[in-house]
Amino acid sequence: MVQIRLDLPQQDAGRVDLDAWKEGLDECDRQKIHAATELIPDEGCREFGFDLAQLLVDLELDADAVATGLVYETARTHPLSPDSLQETLGTGVANLVDAMLRMASTSEYQLSNLPMLGNEARNQVDNVRNLLVALIDDPRVAVIKLAERVIALRMAKSMDEETVRRLAREALRIFAPLAGRLGVWQIKWALEDLAFRHLHPGEYKRIATSLDARRHERERRVGEIVAELKSRLADAGIDAEVIGRAKHIYSIWRKMRRKAVDLSQVYDMEAVRVIVDDVQRCYGALGVVHTAWPHIGSEFDDYVASPKDNGYQSIHTAVMGPEGRVLEVQIRSREMHRQAEIGLCAHWVYKDERRESLHSDKMSWLRRVLEWHDDVAELADLSELEADPVSIDRIYVATPQGHVLDLTQGATPVDFAYRVHTEIGHRCVGARADGIPVPLNAPLATGQKVEIITGETEQPRREWLNPALGFVKTSRARMKIQSWFRDQIAESNVAAGRGLLEDTFRRLDLAADPGELAREAGYASENELWRAVGVGECQIIDLVRLMGGERLPDRQLSLLPAAAEREAGSVQEILIAGDDRQGLLRDITSVLAAMHIDVVSTVARADAAGENATVSICMRVRDILQLARAVDRLRRIPSVRDVRRS
């Protein structure tokens, strides 16, 4: 049965009793904990913070994590700036609190599949889980988040019923499997029992009441088994700690559902755990257990010889014990037991000099083990949850309604719009990320909530298909845009393609015979070439590349230096015309710096403040392709009207 309240070590005036927490804390850490308590403004935040901090102490996390637990609820519900946190509690706590606040938004996400995606529906549990893990940049954050969910469920009575049920569903579908993969078993069991208590209160109460009524009988049987096993181990010369272990309520209910039996027919609710000094004695104890009672052959797992992915080690066996009842036995060393109880947290007691490399190792491990196939397979009654490894090549962003979508790393609002719905993509005219307007070619980041602003008519822009401008990253969006343009009147695509090609060549001061260029590119006629450019099947930058050095007129060869000079590049002058404004020159040089283009000289002038401005820039480029990309990107700078090669 879950523990609903903790007995907190407090002194008068609500201050934490550090004597109860003193192990592992130096004077600096004590001061940090005291400072954290003084930031808590009211009793509600104090109760939540102290409960969470105590649980983190039980998990043996460090002082920064404990201080984070104390102030997290305050930071979430009250104005508490990152600067003040950093000044009072240090950078470590400020970073942990910031990470926790970023992860708090997962509670706003939907766990149901997204209807509007039709036959491309994604499992939202997968996407929320992947988003959650992608936001973890410190292993302690995962553990603090799990502990915070336990406290939230313990204090959920004051919330409305729908909120409580949502918290409980999240706990079962996302956080309990995560706790299992991290090996933090006491958190996993607490989350499962608390969630079960809120989702199925009748079933929970029935099982809990029945277990309580039979507690004395069960304790008698387990006590006799423990005494007998201790005696047998002592006779074999094995010094061991033997303790009775009751199964948690959710696991009992799940077994009842899986085997379609009543509680009275669940015979393996009793279990004992044998803890010895080393691996050799583990196998010695196993021999004693199998000698004492008949072994059930199908119920044996050796996680000592073959540990689980999360590092868990223990021998699991089952025997037909006294009175013909199934008895589960776990055998492990003391270090294995400590690892099993607090999992990942066990590694945070090392001193600072080892913590940095340990942090790197554990982050790698964290991402490697988050394949939840085994853990979630038993949740069929809550919906089958498929799970793929978290990919560093994906990002996870949400719609305003809280549905999480996975996209390719570097995806933009245009990609997002087409991922939501083709029509939304076609009508996209702007975007907001977390309420702030962003350019349509701005890369999105995991955790953002994205809103697409749409126009009244479908009108994709051909510039979205220009890879140099970065509007589209996903093949899905690119194909949808191309398909829209293919459906337009052929003449309009030909005219648009011809205009784009001629405009680009004019800006680059290049010349080419359209018919010859079409044949070189594999098209039957110049009209076919222009149509392909108009619908985005053929990129202008590829045509520029195709022209090569041999087919350019003499006056254009300076863009294609001899091999010996190619590394140094060629100095080219471009002229930029636009409206004079503050920061224009800075924006121009920033674009070139981002492209790793060296600026040799700059001359800028304006007719009058706020009127026409002209900027002449000499820059060193590798080849004509780099020049073409630079011209394209410079044209997108606000208030720039024209860019051309001099």
Image (spheres, rainbow, N blue to C red):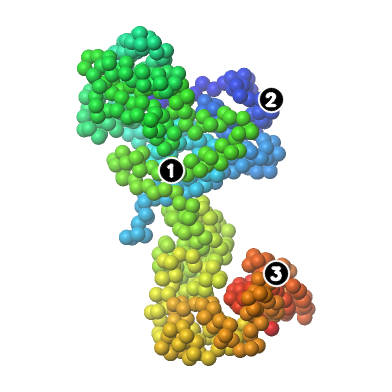
Q: Nearer the viewer, residue 515 or 226?
A: 515
Q: What's the residue at 37%, 54% (across, down)?
A: 122
What distance separates the C-alpha of mark 1 from that of mark 2?
A: 37 Å
Crowd band around label 2 with a 10 angstrom C-alpha radius: few (<14), some (14–19), many (20+)? few
The three-letter amino acid code for the residue at tag 1 is Leu
Q: Earlier in the sequence, mark 1 or mark 2?
A: 2
- Quadrant in the picture for residue 558: bottom right
Image quadrant containing the C terminus? bottom right
Residue bearing the label numbered 3: 598
Numbered circle sitting on residue 27? 2
Q: Are marks 1 and 2 in contact (CB under 8 Å)?
A: no
The three-letter amino acid code for the residue at tag 2 is Glu
Q: Earlier in the sequence, mark 3 or mark 1?
A: 1
Q: Is residue 273 visible?
A: no
425 is higher (above) or lower (below) than 74: below
What distance separates the C-alpha of mark 2 from that of mark 3?
A: 53 Å
Q: Earlier in the sequence, mark 2 or mark 3?
A: 2
Crowd band around label 3 with a 10 angstrom C-alpha radius: few (<14), some (14–19), many (20+)? some
Q: What's the residue at 36%, 26% (across, down)?
A: 315
Residue bearing the label numbered 1: 370
Q: What's the residue at 39%, 75% (across, down)?
A: 483
Looking at the picture, how far across and down is residue 507, in whole percent? 62, 83
560 is higher (above) or lower (below) than 491: above
Q: What is the count of numbered marks?
A: 3
